[in-house]
Image: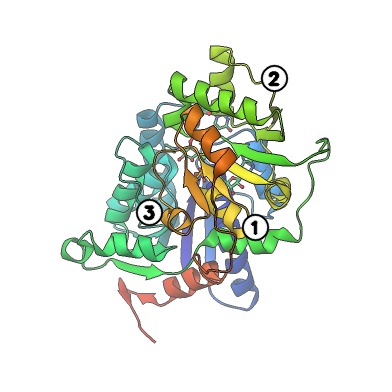
């Protein structure tokens, strides 16, 4: 079985790291399985890309397309064109895509035009906010995929409610658990404190990059104001995404009270999550990682795809109003019992590859 994996953005390196490791193990055991890695170049700074390949021992990409820092249409269009050439050259059995970025959509469209089977990891997630570029990317990708790997029961329910079978008889959805849990469990024991970071007191770990916050000066200003007030009593450590850095510089926002650091690699990130008092974020992946490490999360968005975290009292949606953020920071009533299983058994990657191996000529061969 030959898989072409399409990657491009930070969360995809982290997700694919676990699946590539599983593929490597199966190959070492003599199974006939080959993975070709295509890096679109969507994220390109060393600390947004190379560091993950090095630390997580992800094989060096076979193709690097160098398409980053462009408008959505230009980026996605150029990716489709270049990925198509790779697929014609490689003739894989599967194209494997992750999540909801422009790289995900480009990989899926290029494969669908060539009638190559598509596997979508993190299928079925919905925010029901069509203003998010990610929502468009994930819905379109799900629609043209053949194997939909759903991390949660809610994601399965979403797929089942969208009449996939009526549209595409070759689509199958699987509840496989979350590949990010595989990674969190594996890397926990390898985590490292960021070398130059001074940590003298309790800290809140914060990340911010979501377009709906960074592209709205009112939202980003209120978030920074709220974080600056919180920073009077605890350190607020903010590994700064390049997108947010540009906005802070452009509008001259005052971040003096915050501990701003460059984006960190995954081993440092796991240490920060494991040692923080609370996570405050607009990231998708970090909401789940907070839960994996027994931490509560305030999500600075108006909705989330990871609704089970909110429903079970581990995460609160606080939007981007300063008052709402502060009110919840000081008086949130969280659930402290993290024993519930929401994301599977940490073996999602294995289950995904084994499922792909059971397909033959477009049909799933059941045991
Ligand atoms: C993208 C994804 C988002 C995901 C996020 C993960 C889309 C539509 N969005 O958002 O779903 O949550 O990645 O982090 O695909 N930049 C750099 N250096 C880099 C990477 C980006 O300077 O290494 C700059 C770009 O030039 C651009 C900005 O950051 O100006 C945004 O990058 P882009 O990849 O378009 O979107 P993200 O906000 O990173
Ligand atoms: N992350 C990281 N270093 C950082 C910030 C985030 O390794 O400086 C990790 C984080 O732990 C999670 C992933 O990046 O595994 C989430 O990526 P991001 O927030 O960029 O994207 P999203 O999940 O929102 O799509």
Image quarter where ligand 2 lies: top right
**Chosen colour scheme:** rainbow
Furthest toward the front, the residue is 331
User: Is residue 82 among the parts visible in the rendering?
Assistant: no
SS class, disc 1: loop
Q: Report the side of 58 relative to 178 (left or right).
A: right
Task: Identify the residue position indicated by label 3 in the image.
Answer: 125
Q: Residue at x 71, y 59 (%)?
A: 188
Locate the C terminus by quadrant. bottom left
Q: Residues within 10 Å of mark 2 (few under 14, many from 20)?
A: few
Tell whether circle 3 marks a residue whose Cβ is less than 8 angstroms from ligand 2: no
Secondary structure state at the residue bearing disc 3: loop
Looking at the image, residue 215 lies above or below residue 279: above
What residue does disc 2 label? 256
Mark 1 — residue?
293
Residue 355, located in which quarter of the rendered image? bottom left
State left or right for residue 74 relative to residue 62: left
Q: Position of residue 160 (x, y in %)?
A: 26, 65
Asked if residue 121 can be seen in this view, the reply is: yes
For the point 35% across and 46% down, the residue is 127
Residue visible at 53% across and 28% down?
223
Mark 2 against mark 3, which lies toward the viewer?
Answer: 2
Q: Earlier in the sequence, mark 1 or mark 2?
A: 2
Q: CA distance from mark 2 to mark 3?
A: 36 Å
Left or right? Give the position of 98 relative to 129.
right
Residue 120 image point, x, y percent: 40, 58
């Amino acid at each position: 079985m030959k898989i072409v994996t399409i990657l491009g953005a930070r969360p995809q390196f982290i997700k694919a790291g676990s699946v590539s490791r599983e593929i490597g193990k199966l190959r070492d055991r003599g199974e006939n399985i080959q993975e070709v890695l295509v890096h679109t170049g969507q994220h390109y700074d060393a600390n947004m890309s190379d560091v993950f390949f090095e630390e997580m021992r992800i094989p060096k990409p076979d193709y690097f397309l160098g398409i980053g820092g462009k408008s959505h249409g230009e980026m996605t269009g150029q990716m489709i064109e270049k990925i198509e050439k790779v697929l014609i050259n490689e003739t894989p059995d599967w194209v494997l895509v992750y999540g909801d970025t422009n790289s995900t959509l480009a990989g899926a469209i290029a494969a669908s035009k060539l009638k190559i089977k598509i596997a979508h990891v993190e299928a079925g997630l919905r925010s029901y906010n069509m203003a998010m570029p990610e929502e468009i990317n994930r819905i379109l990708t799900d629609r043209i995929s053949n194997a939909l790997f759903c991390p949660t029961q809610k994601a399965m329910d979403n797929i089942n409610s969208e009449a996939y079978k009526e549209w595409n008889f070759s689509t199958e959805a699987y509840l496989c658990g979350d590949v990010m849990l595989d990674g969190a469990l594996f890397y926990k024991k390898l985590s490292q404190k960021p070398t130059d970071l001074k940590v003298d007191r309790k800290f809140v770990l914060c990340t911010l990059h979501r377009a709906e916050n960074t592209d709205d000066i009112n939202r980003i200003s209120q978030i920074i104001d709220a974080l600056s007030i919180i920073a009077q009593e605890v350190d607020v450590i903010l590994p700064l995404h390049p997108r947010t850095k540009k906005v802070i510089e452009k509008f001259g926002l005052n971040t003096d009270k915050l501990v701003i650091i460059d984006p960190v690699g995954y081993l440092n990130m796991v240490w920060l999550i494991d040692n923080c008092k609370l996570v405050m974020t607009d990231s998708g992946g970090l909401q789940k990682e907070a839960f994996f490490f027994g931490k509560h999360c305030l999500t600075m968005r108006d909705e989330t795809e990871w609704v089970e975290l909110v429903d079970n009292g581990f995460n609160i949606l606080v939007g981007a109003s300063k008052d709402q953020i502060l009110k919840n920071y000081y008086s949130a009533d969280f659930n402290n019992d993290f024993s519930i299983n929401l994301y599977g058994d940490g073996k999602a990657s294995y289950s995904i590859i084994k499922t792909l191996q059971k397909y033959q000529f477009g049909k799933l061969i059941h045991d």
